[in-house]
């Protein structure tokens, strides 16, 4: 029998976040296109730790549990209370901007195909706006 003597003492501040608007699209030369999208989930939990420097984003599962989806490193804007969170690790996902004052967020992902000259040089855009409320603590 193995006993873990090191308890998880990290303090988390958690927010349940609901998406108000989710769009996806592409742009290439003069063509631009955006439509409603389900690229980002409707409901997630954002779990901040280390004085809002680390974010773990959790998705709801079919069993109504949450599981960590991605981890982000966050920096606070010096002139406002807006956090800019960028993905950590090999999987480079979207960026999250989160306001500590209004509890609103924006998730955005823009591909780099055009800059890198790959494929048909079409860039894809995914954006989600929403709001959050504090839970558990």
Image (tube, grey):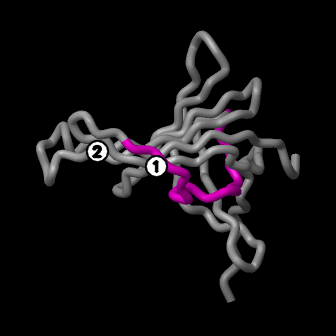
- Checking the image for residue 24, the label placed there is 1
Write the residue at 46% across / 49% down.
24
User: Which is nearer the eye, 71 or 121?
Assistant: 121
Report the side of 120 relative to 112 (left or right). left
Write the residue at 63% across / 44% down.
21
According to the picture, the residue beneath numbered tag 2 turns out to be: 123
Q: Position of residue 113 (x, y in %)?
A: 21, 46
- Checking the image for residue 101, the label placed there is none
Residue 87 in view in this figure: no
User: Which is nearer the eye, 106 or 26?
Assistant: 26
- Residue 54's image quarter? top right
Q: Where is residue 109 in the image (x, y as percent from the top left)?
A: 42, 44
Write the residue at 54% across / 35% down.
74
Q: Would you call the spot at circle 2 few (<14 residues within 10 Å), some (14-19), or many (20 or more)?
A: some
Report the side of 56 relative to 64 (left or right). left
Element type at marker 2?
A: strand
The stretch of residues the image draws in magenta is: 33-51
Inter-mark Cα distance, 1 to 2: 11 Å
Q: Where is residue 64 in the image (x, y as percent from the top left)?
A: 77, 73
The answer to whether mark 1 and mark 2 are in CB contact below 8 A is: no
Residue 84 in view in this figure: yes
Magenta highlight on residue 46 = yes
**Total residue callouts:** 2
Q: Quadrant of the N terminus?
A: bottom right
Q: Would you call the spot at circle 1 few (<14 residues within 10 Å), some (14-19), or many (20 or more)?
A: many
* Residue sticking out furthest to the bottom: 1
Element type at marker 1?
A: strand
Magenta highlight on residue 12 = no
Report the side of 41 relative to 23 (left or right). right
Q: Position of residue 14 (x, y in %)?
A: 76, 47
| Label located before the other in sequence (1 or 2) | 1
């Amino acid at each position: 029998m193995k006993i873990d003597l090191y308890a998880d003492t990290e303090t988390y501040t958690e927010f349940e976040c609901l998406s108000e608007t989710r769009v996806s699209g592409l742009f290439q030369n003069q063509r631009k296109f955006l439509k409603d999208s389900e690229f980002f989930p409707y409901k997630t939990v954002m779990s901040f730790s280390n004085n809002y420097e680390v974010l773990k984003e959790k998705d709801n599962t079919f069993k109504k549990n949450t599981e960590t989806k991605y981890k982000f490193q966050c920096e606070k804007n010096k002139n406002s209370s807006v956090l800019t969170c960028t993905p950590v690790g090999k999987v480079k996902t979207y960026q999250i901007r989160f306001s500590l004052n209004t509890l609103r967020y924006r998730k955005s992902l823009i591909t780099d195909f055009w800059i890198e000259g790959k494929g048909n040089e079409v860039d894809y855009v995914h954006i989600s706006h929403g709001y959050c409320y504090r839970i558990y603590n």
